[in-house]
Image (spheres, rainbow, N blue to C red):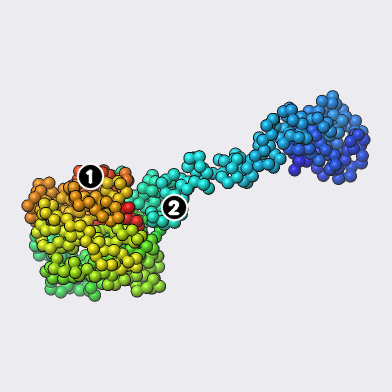
Amino acid sequence: MRFHTCCLLFFFFLGCGDSGNTAATSADATPTPDTNSPDSSIADTGPIDSMEPDTAVVDTASPVDTVSTDDTATTTDAASSDTTPQDTGVPDTNPNADSDGDTILDKDDNCPNTENTDQMDFDGDNIGDVCDPDDDNDNVSDSSDAFPNDPNEWGDVDGDGTGDNADTDDDNDGLDDDEESTFGTDCAITNPLDADTDMDGVPDAADAYPNDPFPAFITMENTDGSIEVILSDGAGGFAAPFQVGKDLGHLCAAPDTNCKNACGPGTYCSVGVCKAEDTTQCDDPCATGQACRQRLYTKTSIADFDGDGKMDFIANTIPPEADGTHQVWFFKRLSAEGQFPQQLLGHVNRLLRGPVADVNGDFLFDIVRYTVNKPGYIADVTGVTFLGNGIQDSTNCVVGDTAADGCAFVRVANIFDVTDVVDNQWGFPWAREAQDLTGDGYNDLVFGTYASGGNSPTKVYLLPSNGDGTFATPSLLFTHNATGKQAPTNSMMFANFTDDKIGDVVLGLDDDGDAGAAWLYAGTGSGTFSGASSKVFDINKACNSGCGDQVGRTGSAKTYDFDFDGNMDVILGYNYQDVSKPPSKLVIFFGKGNGTFGPETQIGPTWSGNEANRFQAPQRLCPWYQ
C-alpha cells in the first residue's frame, strides 16, 4: 500500500517506475544488480510517507527516473523535501525529518504529512484524527458519519442531535421506533426513519392510513347500478362524485316500498325512486307483484380488508337473488384516479353490514352484524361476528366456519345475549365505531334502546368484547334525554372530540323533541362520561322543542378527520324536506377540537332519492377513541 502511494507521488512530480522492475539500493548509494526483490529493511523517511516510515525502496533503475545509466545523479529530485542540494537516489534517512513542519518528527508523528501538534487519536489506532478517515472505527467514514467520534452512532435522520441507535423516535413523528415497527397501539406498521411513510403530506401519527398515499373517500349508493365515489382532498374539500362498479344486470324481484309517492304504470320503486321498468332485460316475464329490476350495490363498508395498508371496500347487492341470497363484491384500491378493480367473493343469506372494527385483536378488520326481530316492539336482537381472514386474489367465498376454509371471513354465531335490555323496546340505535372502553385491548360495542316512538329517553349500553368475536353481558353507561328536553338517539359516534386524549361521545339526531340536534358527552376516562351534555350542532334549527316527525332523524352519522387537522369531523346524510321521504343531502360538520363544530357544509349535489342516507366513510383499524 505504501509503495503504491510512493509511486503515485513520484508519478505526479517525475513519473512512476515499473513496480515489476525494482532495483535494490544500499544505504551508501552503491548500485547493485536488479534482483526484482526490493529490500524491505531500508526505511524511507522522506515526505512521501503519509502515515509512518515506509519500507519501500525507490527504484533507481526505472527508465523514468532522472538518474543516469551509470547511477550518477544529474537532477534534483523534485519529490523530496530533503535539504541535500542534490538527490542521490538514496532514501532520506534523516532521523530529524519533520515533513509537515509541526515540530513533531516524522518518526513520532501520527500524521507526518498533516500538521497536528495535538496528536489527537480518538480511537487509538496510531493514526491521528486529522488524517484518520474513520476516527471512531465504526466502519463509517467521517465524511458520512454524523457522529465521527462515537463508535455506536453514525446517523441522525431527524437531525435532533441524538443518534438513530439511541433515539427512540428517529423521524420525530411522535411515534417511537418500536411502535412503528409493529402494529402496536396505532395499529399500523410504518417506516421509523420517515415521518410520512406514504408521502401524502400527512405525518404518520396523524394519518388514519399511513401506508395509503391516495385520498380518503366516501362511497354512496345510487339507483343506476353503480357506486358513487367522492374523493377527499385532505383539506376539507371534496371532488365531484364519479362512478365505479360493473353493470350487474337485472332480475325479477318485488319493488321497494319507500318512494314518496306511488309509482305509475311501467315503473317500480327502487331505493326511494320510481324507475322505468325495462322488461326486455329479464329472460322471462316476471310474476305478479314483481318487476324487472336492475341489481344495485348496497351496504358498503370501507376499511382495509386485504391488509395491504390501503383503503378498500366491500359492497352487497339488492334485490336478493331468486334463492334469497345477496352477492358480495370486493373493491381493491389501486390509485387516486379512482381505479377500483372488483372481485366477486360469493353470496350471503343476509346483507353483510354492521360495525367494522378489529374485535379480536389480530389486526384484521371484522364486521359485526345485528339482526333485530321487531314484529311491533323489539322481541330480540341477535348477532354474528365475521372475523376478518384477509382477502386474497384467490378468495372465492365470503364466509367460512374456520380460517382454513380460505374465505374472506370466519363466522362466529350467537355472540351476545341482550334480551333482558332490548325486550319490548321501540328503538335499537348502535354505534358505527367500536372502541376499547374497558382497557383490555379489545374493541367493545355500544348500543342504545328507547321505549317508544316519541320523545323518550335513550339508555346507552356497553357490550364488552371477550376478545374472540363474542361479547359479555351488557352494562348501562348512561341515560340520554332523561328529562325529555333533548331527543332520542338514532346516531352514536365515539371519538376524541375535545382533543384531551380522552374519548367522548356525540349522539342524538331524531325527529322528536329537539329534532335534528346532537349532544356531546365529554369523556372522563376509563370509559366513563360526564353526566352533563352540550348541544353541538343541529340539522333542523327551525324546531327546538316539542317536535314530532320533523326533519332531523338519521342513523347514518359517522366520524372521520377529513381535513386532517387533527380534529374529528362528523359526516351524515338526511332527508331535508320530509323526515321519511327524499330528497336527501350529504353534509359535514368540521370539528374544532374543543367539542364544538363548524356550520353545516354540504358535500356534492342534492339527491332525488335516499342516496345521501346510504353512504359510508372509512374506518381505521384502531378507532379514533384513544
In the picture, the quarter occupied by the N terminus is top right
Give the alpha-carbon distance from disc 2 to disc 1, as whole Å: 32 Å
Q: Which residue is mark 2?
A: 180
Relative horizontal placement of residue 93, taking residue 618 as reference (left or right): right
Q: Nearer the viewer, residue 33 or 435?
A: 435
Q: Nearer the viewer, residue 331 or 578?
A: 578
Q: Position of residue 497 (x, y in %)?
A: 27, 48
Q: Secondary structure at mark 2?
A: helix
Q: Position of residue 427 (x, y in %)?
A: 15, 63
Q: Quadrant of residue 471?
A: bottom left
Q: Nearer the viewer, residue 22 or 487?
A: 487
Relative horizontal placement of residue 155, taking residue 21 as reference (left or right): left
Question: Which sits earlier in the primary sequence, circle 2 or circle 1?
Answer: 2
Number of numbered discs on residues: 2
Q: Quadrant of residue 228?
A: bottom left
Contact (CB < 8 A) between labels 2 and 1?
Answer: no
Amino acid type of the residue that numbered disc 1 sits on in the rendered structure: Thr
Q: Residue at x 65, y 42 (%)?
A: 123
Q: Nearer the viewer, residue 31 or 564?
A: 564
Q: Residue at x 72, y 28 (%)?
A: 102
Q: Is residue 412 visible?
A: yes
Q: Position of residue 339 (x, y in %)?
A: 35, 55
Q: Which residue is mark 1?
A: 596
Whether 459 is drawn above or below 192: the answer is below
Q: Quadrant of residue 286?
A: bottom left
Could you say which disc has been placed on residue 112 in the image?
A: none
Q: Secondary structure at mark 1?
A: loop
Q: Position of residue 9 (x, y in %)?
A: 75, 35
Amino acid type of the residue that numbered disc 2 sits on in the rendered structure: Glu
Query: Which residue lies most toward the top here?
Result: 85
